[in-house]
Amino acid sequence: MDAGLRWLTERFAERTQISADYSSHQPKRLADDQETQLFPIAQDALTNIARHSGATEAKVRSDTSGDQVLLRIEDNGRGMPAETSTKSRRGRVFWP
């Protein structure tokens, strides 16, 4: 997963000319199903940054704590209105 997210972040920066940084604190590889689920989530988030945020910088962070995985994707773009960013659609939570 680490290599896949690093590759995705680097390709995103090359393609969009948005500065992007990747860091990870994963001591071991994730389970296959976790990796399979996290990659398209990161891909979708970076696509949204490129299309909608007006950002010049993005950060992708991956960390684990016990059996939990934290994937944090941030940018310096304009963001979403507060009432939109905390709502959930079809079971997916959108983080500000």
Image: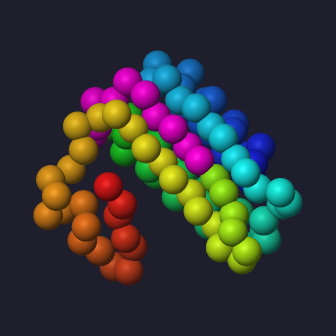
Q: The C terminus is located in which quarter?
A: bottom left
Is 16 drawn above or below residue 41 in the view shown? above
Q: Is residue 16 left or right of residue 30?
A: left
Res 66 quadrant in image: bottom right
> In the displayed image of the protein, which residue is found farthest to the bottom?
91
Res 87 seen here: yes
> In the displayed image of the protein, which residue is found farthest to the front?
65
Residue that appears at 34% across and 34% down = 76
Is 46 drawn above or below residue 38 in the view shown? above
- Front in this rendered view, residue 92 or 64: 64
Is 39 drawn above or below residue 14 in the view shown? below
- Residue 28 location in percent, x, y? 85, 60
Res 36 seen here: no
Q: Is residue 10 left or right of residue 89?
A: right
Residue that appears at 62% across and 37% down = 22
- Front in this rendered view, residue 69 or 32: 69
Q: Is residue 59 magenta?
A: yes
Residue that appears at 72% across and 77% down = 67
Tell me the magenta residue range.
52-61
**Colouring mode (rainbow / by chain / secondary structure / one colour):** rainbow
Q: The N terminus is located in which quarter?
A: bottom right
- Residue 37 location in percent, x, y? 62, 66
- Residue 31 location in percent, x, y? 79, 71
Is 72 drawn above or below residue 7 in the view shown? below
- Residue 19 location in percent, x, y? 49, 23
Q: Is residue 96 magenta?
A: no
Residue that appears at 23% across and 37% down = 78
Query: How many numbered tags mark residues here?
Result: 0
